[in-house]
Amino acid sequence: MSKVILKMENIHKQFPGVYALNAVNFELNYGEVHALLGENGAGKSTLIKIIAGIYQPDDGAITVNGEKCIIDSVNTAHSLGISVIHQELCLVPDMTISENIFLGRELSSGKTGFVNFGEQNIKAQEILDSMELNIKATDKIRTLSVAQQQMVEIAKALSVESEIIVMDEPTSSLSEKEVDMLFKTIENLKKRNISIVYISHRLEELFKITDRITVLRDGKYIGTRNTREITRDDLISMMVGRDLKDLYIRTYHKLGEKIFEVKNIKRGNVLNNISFSLNKGEILGISGLVGAGRTELARAIFGVDKFDSGKIIIDEKEVIINSPEEAMKQGIVLVPESRKEQGLILKRSVGYNITLCILKDFIKIIKNDTAKEKSIIADYIKRLSIKTPSAQQLVVNLSGGNQQKIVIAKSLATKPKVLILDEPTRGVDVLAKSEIYSIISMLASQGLSIIMISSDLPEIINMSDRVVVMCRGEVTGILNRDELDQERIIKFATGGIKNAN
């Protein structure tokens, strides 16, 4: 018997003006965790949609369990034992776990046609128990953590007896503890001979959880390697087609005077007497575990959430900020953690998004200075190397890295003094990360003051002049560049030591 459960040979897929997949091969073994790796735009999503039955290939062959097949719909994929867990979870918050697991496949009571909720709850609980999850089938989805919701998606896949589960960026919104929980579940699935296609930009995860890694680049198959036989640098080289010797692009320069200060900001039990300063041209990292209050601090500074007490001082003058509009008037702008929900209007153009916050600069009553508008858009597309066919391209059609550059461009268009970046490289590929680091370094060297919030410790250490470490809503340490190492930051972040400056 063959050990291969899924085989895709010479897969081609073309869209108008784009060759998404060109002679791509992919092979998945029984009970294997196989990573699919590549930059945004490499073809991963298209290949996944073909596996899921959302797209059909223009050419090529697919074999499942030794039988050649045509996956012409999602239902066909399910009948072949294939389930896809997308990055954006597909659950109904106000329904129970059981109702979500059996959504569209409800168990009925004999001839009556009424849903047998009792039987559904029992069967759902059996699946949850088999996964060693401490949750009840009758719990509402909205009461669960993101990690638990992820597990419900896996339970849904197991309820249709899936033999192949595709996981698309499953850890993008999880804490370290929740990631460990997911990895334990994956190991248990492997023991049950269930095969997993695993997509992640976090290279360190792949070495922990996968057996093999297949790399795509520009819609082409680059190669497949055993995880234990390849290095991180080798993977990066396969992904980008060249050695990426210096991922963290940072040029250091003499910092200017203090231009921004937060004094004793307090907000409920979320922020407790937060104080720090920021110099002209400085990159100030903010680090901490999930729940430390980092994003809450950014929202308070930017006027999204009002704080109870404390001061914000710009150029030695206290300023009152009660809204994002007032923050931007004072020269503060925020690039939010969630670009799709909070940073972009995806169904509008690149140009529209870039100039969204500065319409008053070229629209006077009923007159629109089109030349000025086009000049601003073209300038930022060039400065930030935004890869787009034109300024009219819809943002939704661009890669995650280019979308993130557009959010940064929109913020820079307001001519800020202080740029707050909340998880600026989350969900983008390694090459896009390097480009974003280059942009951040360039902006700092030009005198822009930057607050960078990140969960990525190497990112924090390699890009920051100083680092503010937070734990449970407090500043536990402020570290200079020569004090930065992962162990020290983690100790401050877990409350093991406290030495706020």
Image (cartoon, rainbow, N blue to C red):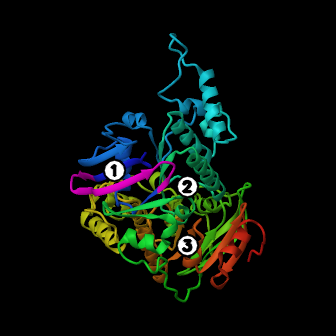
Which part of the image, by quadrant, shows the C terminus?
A: bottom right
Foreground mark, 3 or 1, reads 1
Q: Main secondary structure of the magenta part?
A: strand
Which part of the image, by quadrant, shows the N terminus?
A: top left
For residue 297, what is the image quadrant? bottom right
Please say if the residues under marks 2 and 3 sit with CB atoms less than 8 Å apart: no
Q: Secondary structure at mark 3?
A: helix
- The mark nearer the N terminus, 1 or 2, is 1
Q: Would residue 15 be counted in the magenta stretch?
A: yes
Q: Which residue is mark 1?
A: 8
Q: Secondary structure at mark 2?
A: loop
What residue is rendered at 53% in x and 45% in y?
193
Give the amino acid at mark 1.
Met
Q: Which residue is mark 2?
A: 171
- The mark nearer the N terminus, 3 or 1, is 1
Q: Find the distance from the CA under tag 1 to the CA under tag 2.
A: 26 Å
Q: Find the distance from the CA under tag 2 to the CA under tag 3.
A: 18 Å
Give the amino acid at mark 2.
Thr
User: Which numbered marker is on residue 459?
Assistant: 3
Residues in magenta, as a range: 11-34
Foreground mark, 1 or 2, reads 1
Question: Taking 466 as reference, is 3 above or below it?
Answer: above
- The mark nearer the N terminus, 2 or 3, is 2
How far across and down, in percent of the image, does residue 389 sit? 25, 62
Q: Extreme left residue here?
A: 17
Question: Taking 389 as reference, is 254 above or below it?
Answer: below
Q: Secondary structure at mark 1?
A: strand
